[in-house]
Image (cartoon, helix red, strand yellow):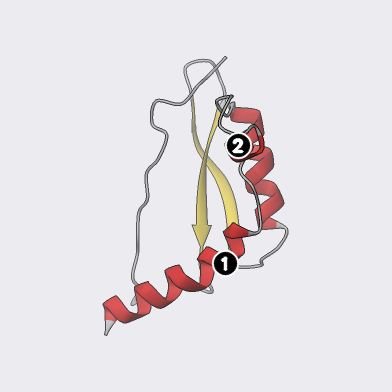
């Protein structure tokens, strides 16, 4: 049952994110995404859904914010939690 919920959630949210080209896609994969572009992209997605929030969980050694994005309709303890960790070695010009 839980796997059906996760799969349904991923399928539903995939359409939401498919509407927005990432900075990498906008550059036709010719330029790496810098931190400021990533934060701006996340903010543009957040505007489209009340379920999406962004917080800063830390700062890089160069002082750039490291965002964490949460997609949730509530704060129930019984909800499934999924962690997706990406771009741990991002471009930081």
Question: Residue 85, position in %: x, y?
Answer: 37, 44
Residue at point 60% right, 40% down? 25
Q: Report if residue 2 is visible in the image.
A: yes
Give the residue number, with chain letter if any, for mark 1: 15
- Give yes or no for contact between labels 1 and 2 (Cβ–Cβ under 8 Å): no
Residue annotated with mark 2: 38
Q: Nearer the viewer, residue 88 or 24?
A: 24
Quadrant location, the N terminus: bottom left
Residue 79, image x, y percentages = 37, 74
Q: Earlier in the sequence, mark 1 or mark 2?
A: 1
Q: Is residue 75 visible?
A: no
Question: Which residue does the image show at 59% across and 28% down from the upper left?
Answer: 35
Secondary structure beneath disc 2? helix
Of the 4 image quadrants, the one containing the C terminus is: top right
Front residue (pair 34, 69):
34
Residue depth check, mark 1 versus mark 2: number of the one nearer the observer:
1
Q: Is residue 61 left or right of residue 37?
A: left
**Labels in figure, total:** 2
Residue neighbourhood size for the residue with mark 2, other residues' Cα within 10 Å, grouped as few (<14), some (14–19), many (≥20): some
52 with respect to 84 (left or right): right
Element marked by disc 1: helix
């Amino acid at each position: 049952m839980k796997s059906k919920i996760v799969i349904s959630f991923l399928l539903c949210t995939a359409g939401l994110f498919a509407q927005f080209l990432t900075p990498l896609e906008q550059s036709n994969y010719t330029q790496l995404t810098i931190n400021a572009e990533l934060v701006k992209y996340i903010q543009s997605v957040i505007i489209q859904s009340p379920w999406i929030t962004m917080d800063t969980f830390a700062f890089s050694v160069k002082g750039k914010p490291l965002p964490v994005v949460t997609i949730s309709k509530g704060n129930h303890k019984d909800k499934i939690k999924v962690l997706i960790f990406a771009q741990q070695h991002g471009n930081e010009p």
